[in-house]
């Protein structure tokens, strides 16, 4: 099943009403690019422009080395000739066709030996054996998702367009299908564009992430670089950094590469702000070990991921973690596969823990706990 050996590249502009979009992409064969961003950012519109369901006001789109749209040259290949496999969250299976016929639908040579072999191969790869003669309504959500994926892949597309394909599935099934789908895409060599607003999904599936907001790409890069510790405020908020604290710099310690940031009810040790390093006023003894921040104090936003915080029932005094905050549990919320604990430490902190930790600690609202995290788990968010 090798196709799409030339990837897809292009750019497209489009506007409708007040909304204007400027998108661009470059996806090598067998690679997955995630379009990540909030609802209304323009992700689905981008996919529709590439699929040929919408016409860009300007642009140049190549799929599998072939130009399918060029505004200046007047090239416009219709949707059904673009060789894209387009999968949306609704699956859109034909209710009157059985699984086998649904998969074979887009094949010109469905009756030939090669066509039949292709369908058989997809049924096997997507583990649909035994379900060939069922109707879509006789399938579970996960099975329907696989059938629609098989149908999208059957004609040997040069580009896969996946628009929130896991949305209607439960969390456990998503996790399983994600890794299966990723393996299949890499194996098939088909370049893939994945639309998602789920950070975990983008991290699990994508080779490259483009963050979109209000019709513009505001950041792109390796998934961990963009979604791990995002440096820019808007990106940090979009990718859901759970804890963003507005603080002021109290003092800087260049030797340790750290500084103390304070706010009402909270005091944190965080990595030094290298770019905006503040000379402040040196110590009386002339050493530069500790610098007192200038007046007026500089404001910073400090981000901490919920998963980087350890919860403990006592003060881990002997630990190397520089930040230990005592707080009261406000809320315990199941967030499969773990739990989110909301802790009031003077400021509200969201913390993630695993199911096993929850079972052991039996955390309940009202309980006193310590939130413990390293200075290096804190990062500065530039607005
Ligand atoms: P996303 O997929 O990122 O959630 P969409 O691409 O679906 O975003 O939508 C992007 C923007 O385009 C939205 O602000 C939406 O209001 C606007 N939009 C999409 N389709 C239409 C339409 N048919 N008429 C008016 N506005 C539209």
Image: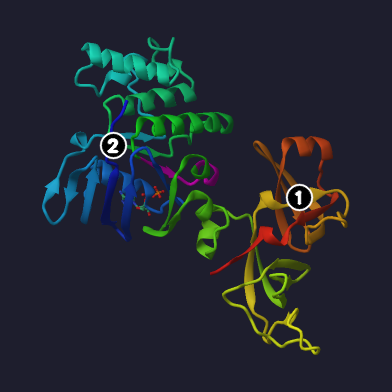
Q: Is residue 380 left or right of residue 318?
A: left
- Which residue is rendered at x = 37% and y = 52% of the image? 42
Give coordinates of residue 271: x percent, y percent: 67, 67
- Which residue is rendered at x = 45% and y = 34% of the image? 182
Pointer 1: what residue?
310
Image-quadrant location for residue 247 = bottom right
Q: State which quarter of the image contains the N terminus.
A: top left
Q: Which mark is residue 185?
A: none
- Which residue is rendered at x = 32% and y = 22% of the image? 94
- Callout in the foreground (1, 2): 2
Pointer 2: what residue?
5
Q: Does residue 277 sit above or below 42 in this rendering?
A: below
> Circle 1: is it few (<14), some (14-19), or many (20+) Cα within 10 Å?
some
Q: Earlier in the sequence, mark 1 or mark 2?
A: 2
Q: Is residue 45 visible?
A: yes
Q: Does residue 206 sit above or below 285 in this rendering?
A: above
Range covered by the magenta-colored residues: 192-201
């Amino acid at each position: 099943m090798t196709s799409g050996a030339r990837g897809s590249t292009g750019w497209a502009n489009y506007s409708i009403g007040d909304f204007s979009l400027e998108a661009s992409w470059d996806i090598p064969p067998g690679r997955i690019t995630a379009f990540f961003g909030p609802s209304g950012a323009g992700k689905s519109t981008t996919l529709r422009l590439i699929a040929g369901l919408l016409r860009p006001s300007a642009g140049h789109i190549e799929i599998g080395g072939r130009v399918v749209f060029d505004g200046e040259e007047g090239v416009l290949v219709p949707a059904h000739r673009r060789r894209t496999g387009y999968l949306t969250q609704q699956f859109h299976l034909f209710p009157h066709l059985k699984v086998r016929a649904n998969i074979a639908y887009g094949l010109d040579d469905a009756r030939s030996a090669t066509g039949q072999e292709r369908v058989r191969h997809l049924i096997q790869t997507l583990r649909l054996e035994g379900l060939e003669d069922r109707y879509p309504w006789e399938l579970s959500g996960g099975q329907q998702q696989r059938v629609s994926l098989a149908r999208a892949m059957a004609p040997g597309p040069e580009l896969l367009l996946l628009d929130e394909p896991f949305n209607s599935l439960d969390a456990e099934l998503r996790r399983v299908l994600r890794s299966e789908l990723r393996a299949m895409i890499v194996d098939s060599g088909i370049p893939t564009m994945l639309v998602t607003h789920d950070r975990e999904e983008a991290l699990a599936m994508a080779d490259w992430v483009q963050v979109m907001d209000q019709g513009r790409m505001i950041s792109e890069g390796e998934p961990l670089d963009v979604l791990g510790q995002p440096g820019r405020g808007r990106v940090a908020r979009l990718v859901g950094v759970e804890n963003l604290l507005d603080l002021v710099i109290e003092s800087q310690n260049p030797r340790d590469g750290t500084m103390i940031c304070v706010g009402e009810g909270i005091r944190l040790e965080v990595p030094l702000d290298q770019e905006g390093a503040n000379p402040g006023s040196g110590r009386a003894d002339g050493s530069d070990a500790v610098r007192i921040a200038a007046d007026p104090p500089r404001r910073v936003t400090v981000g901490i991921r919920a998963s980087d915080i350890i919860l403990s029932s006592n003060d881990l005094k002997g630990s190397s973690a520089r930040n230990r905050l005592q707080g009261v549990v406000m809320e315990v919320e199941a967030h499969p596969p773990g739990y989110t604990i909301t802790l009031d430490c003077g400021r509200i902190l969201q913390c993630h823990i695993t199911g096993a930790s929850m079972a052991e600690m039996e955390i309940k609202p009202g309980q006193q706990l310590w939130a413990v995290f390293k200075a290096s788990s804190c990062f500065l968010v530039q607005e």
